[in-house]
Image (spheres, helix red, strand yellow):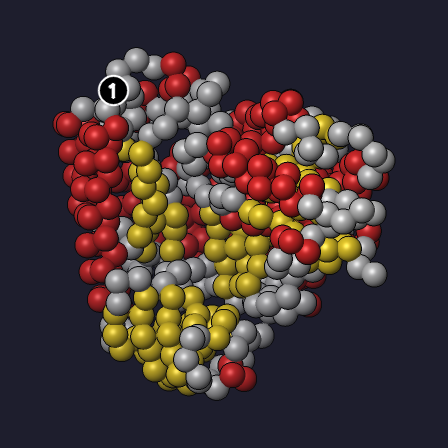
Amino acid sequence: MAKKLFIRTYGCQMNVYDSARMADVLAPLGYAATERVEDADMVILNTCHIREHAEEKVFSELGRLRLLKQAKPDGQRLIIAVAGCVAQAEGEEILARAPYVDIVLGPQTYHRLPEMVAKASRAGAQVLDTDFPAEPKFDHLPPQSVQGPSAFLSVQEGCDKFCSFCVVPYTRGGEYSRPVAAVLAEARSLVEGGTCEITLLGQNVNGYHGNGPDGCGWGLGRLIGALADVPGIERIRYTTSHPRDMGEDLIAAHRDIPQLMPFLHLPVQSGSDRILAQMNRQHTADDYRRLIDRLRTAQPDLALSSDFIVGFPGESDADFESTLGLIRDIGFAQAYSFKYSPRPGTPAAAMEDQVAEDSKDERLAALQSLIAAQATAFNQGCVGRSFDVLLDRPGRHAGQLIGRSPYMQSVFVTAPESMLNTVQRLEMVAANPNSLAANLVERRACA
């Protein structure tokens, strides 16, 4: 009888990818996915350290799992594992505060999960594995078991930028780029499984510098060009990027490679040079503006997304107004915005002049209102245009399918079920705050 595996994923696309790979690693041990945590023989919390109160949320969830573990009938055992960035940062604390947890593993070690499970299956054995192993984990992972037209493909991990607010360099380690041959091999395998859209992942994905078959380091732009030559790949995306690593090859890729979607998530965090310096972003607001000008010259249809932090230590009203000014100057199709919250061990956590919570709340509301207005205007500007849309899930209503536009908008259309998991040409006929409605223009097949 198959054992049941439940994975709860917090955070970014990289964590979604990691969760899927952990399931792949555990499949040979007889674990099959379940949607019900109550039925699970093993539960993994794949954690993220970026959001506010991350540790408290993990311990709250662990408290519920403890009760579930205690309620298991005699002869049945629930293995509880904590993975990801909170595990990396707080591994010993997790085992001390929650001794019923069996496994704590960092994001670089999940290829060793079978060995950890074997140790944890022995009564009373706790496993802590948060090392940064010398061997890349990707060399030891089985092929992806992705089913569907869209898939994540991790090409880079870690970060060397050391932004003063961020824990990623401490929890994910330094930058590592997978060799080009390994990336291309995984891409071909995904296509064989039915994938036609690939999203390249990395904590600093445009810092990619993988070793190519010619013995030289390849940048992300060159890698995207090689992926575009793989038969069956129709759409390519990448996330998340840093402005300092947006090189000429990548800008040219936006101009020259039709498979590369005209949508870019490029975090800026603030529009104030003083705050950007405090954040150790190593660019100015005008550097960002000039970069966007170059990108839009290369690809006039480019739409932008970004990240913003409000209430960073020392942020004044004038600093915040500079951020709003940058947003007005550039115009975004969407954005992610957050109130600053200290992360233990980061330089910003020790900075003086922390901003009051009520000021953070007011600034966040003002910023989100501006972004929402820009997103609505962008959606309305799409009405009357025709896009290729990847129809990847059924809608709520009979005969309705939902897809993703090149700009990551949800698109609703009345279409036959046979078009599910294909790319279709649709005309946008109406805009909603967070989605578009469309009519079918012509039928196409996903290669």
- Give percent across and percent down for residue 308: 31, 38
Residue 13 seen in the current view: yes
Q: Residues within 10 Å of mark 1 (few under 14, many from 20)?
A: some
**Residue 443 place in picture, x, y as percent:** 46, 85
Circle 1: element type: loop
The residue positioned 56% from the left and 29% from the top of the image is 171
The structure residue drawn at horizontal position 48% and vertical position 50%, both measured from the top left corner, is: 238
Q: Amino acid at mark 1?
A: Gly
Q: 87 or 293, which lies in front? A: 87
Return the x and y of residue 42 as percentages of the image width and height. Answer: 71, 47
Give the image quarter of residue 432. Answer: bottom left
- Residue at 68% of width from left, 34% of height from top? 101
Classify residue 366 as left or right of residue 352. Answer: left
Q: Is residue 41 left or right of residue 364?
A: right
Q: Along the line of sight, which residue is nearer the eye, 387 or 63?
A: 63
Q: What residue is rendered at 80% in x and 30% in y?
A: 125
Camera-side residue: 366 or 247?
366
Q: In the image, is 219 to the left or to the right of 323?
A: right
Q: Quadrant of residue 299?
A: bottom left
Q: Which residue is mark 1?
A: 314
Q: Is residue 75 above or below residue 172?
A: below
Q: Is residue 185 visible?
A: no
